[in-house]
Amino acid sequence: METWKETQSGLVKVFKFRNFLKAINFVNDIAKVAEAENHHPDILIHSYNQVKVTSITHDEGKITCKDYSLAKSVDALIVHN
């Protein structure tokens, strides 16, 4: 499984699923977690089954503990699916 990478854009990871519907369901699950944490990542669905998640703390202009917390929560979604 791919790991989170620190980039200039933020903390980034690409998740790959068997099909489009699984990718969409994952995005919806991320939305619930993001709302609960009040920290909202950028999400891109591409190649029909891949979801790219980018998290950065915009008001600080850098990666912070909020981003690592969200990354951990997003990773936990995979374990439960």
Image (cartoon, rainbow, N blue to C red):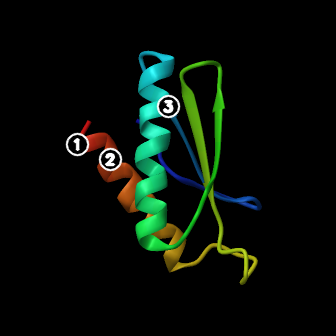
**Mark found first going from the N terminus, 2 or 3:** 3
> Where, quadrant-wise, is the C terminus in this rendering?
top left
Q: In x, y percent, where is residue 70?
A: 45, 64
- Residue 2 shows in the view: no
Q: In x, y percent, where is residue 28?
A: 46, 43
* Front tag of 2 and 3: 3
**Disc 2/disc 1 C-alpha distance (Å):** 5 Å
Crowding at dot 1, Cα within 10 Å, few <14 / some 14-19 / many 20+, comes out as: few
What's the residue type where badge 1 is placed? His
**Which element carries disc 1, helix, strand or loop?**
loop
Q: Which residue is mark 2?
A: 77
> Where, quadrant-wise, is the N terminus in this rendering?
top left
Look at the numbered discs 2 and 1 and tell me whether their residues touch, using CB distance below 8 Å: yes
Q: Which residue is mark 1?
A: 80
Look at the numbered discs 1 and 3 and tell me whether their residues touch, using CB distance below 8 Å: no
**Mark found first going from the N terminus, 1 or 3:** 3
Q: Residue at x 60, y 58 (%)?
A: 41
